[in-house]
Image (cartoon, rainbow, N blue to C red):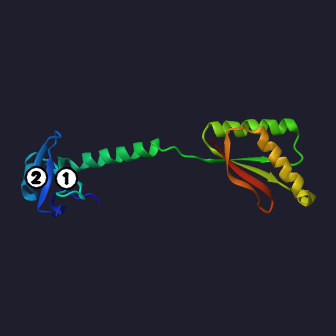
């Protein structure tokens, strides 16, 4: 929480005026008096320094600037979404090629990709063939990828997670 005006409870503060000029270290009462004369607030910007830094600015304007800065930082963060592609043991080569193209597109966009190979019924008896099918599919995917989570059994089938290098 940002302290301002009478809530600032230190003896001295380093003051920056509304134009951005450094006025030096002043008693808090004097700095508050200067802010009131200009019709503005005294806002504590950096409380952990010695002495704390306070700025003469409208508190609403300061809060707006901080919120704007925070929103910009959030929008700049690259979010990595997990995309899923499901394949089957019974799938034809062309269909697997189409899905490999989709995986490559997701990787190029910077997403993590989880490849699921679900087994149904009697297919579960042939787990070794299913695992080999998944490995063959991985060879058709763009070779510039890194395996995050190796091939593992999930109860319904196998899955693997990859990301672009």
At 35% from the left edge and 48% from the top edge, which residue is drawn?
A: 67
Q: Where in the figure is residue 59, as x and y percent of width and height?
A: 23, 50
* 18 in relation to 6, above or below: above
Residue 131: where, in percent of width, then height?
Answer: 83, 53
Q: Quadrant of residue 164?
A: top right
Is residue 88 visible in the rendered image? The answer is no
The disc label shown at residue 53, or none: 1
Residue 20 picture quarter = top left
User: Badge 1, how many Cα within 10 Å: few under 14, some, many 20+?
Assistant: many
In front here: 142 or 61? Answer: 142
Q: Residue at x 73, y 52 (%)?
A: 160
| Quarter occupied by the C terminus | top right
Left/right placement of residue 126 relative to residue 29 reads right
At mark 2, the secondary structure is: strand
Rendered view: 140 above or below 35 = above
Residue 140 visible in this rendered orientation of the protein: yes
Q: Which mark is residue 43?
A: none
Element carrying mark 1: strand
Viewer-proximal residue among 139 and 16: 139
Dot 2 surroundings within 10 Å: few (below 14), some, or many (20 or more)?
A: some
* Cα separation between marks 1 and 2: 9 Å
For marks 1 and 2, the one nearer the N-term is 2
Residue displayed at 87% across by 57% down: 127
- Which residue is the site of mark 2? 25
Q: Is residue 147 above or below residue 6?
A: above
Q: Quadrant of residue 108?
A: top right
Image height check: is 125 above or below 95?
Answer: below
Q: Position of residue 53 (x, y in %)?
A: 19, 53
**For the residues bearing labels 1 and 2, Cβ distance under 8 angstroms:** no
Horizontal and vertical percent for residue 145? 67, 42
């Amino acid at each position: 929480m940002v302290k301002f005006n009478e809530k600032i409870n230190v003896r001295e503060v380093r003051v920056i005026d509304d134009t951005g000029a450094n006025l030096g270290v002043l008693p808090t009462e004097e700095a508050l008096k200067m802010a009131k004369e200009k019709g503005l607030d005294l806002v504590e910007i950096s409380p952990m320094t010695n002495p704390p830094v306070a700025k003469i600015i409208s508190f609403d304007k300061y809060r707006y600037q901080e919120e704007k800065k925070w929103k910009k930082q959030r929008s700049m963060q690259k979010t990595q979404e997990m995309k899923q592609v499901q394949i089957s043991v019974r799938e034809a080569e062309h269909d697997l090629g189409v899905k490999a193209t989709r995986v490559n597109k997701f990787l190029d966009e910077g997403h993590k990709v989880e490849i699921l190979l679900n087994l149904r019924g009697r297919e579960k008896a042939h787990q070794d063939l299913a695992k080999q099918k998944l490995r063959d599919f991985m060879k058709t995917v763009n070779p510039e990828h890194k395996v995050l989570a190796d091939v593992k059994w999930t109860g319904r089938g196998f899955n693997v997670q990859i990301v672009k290098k």
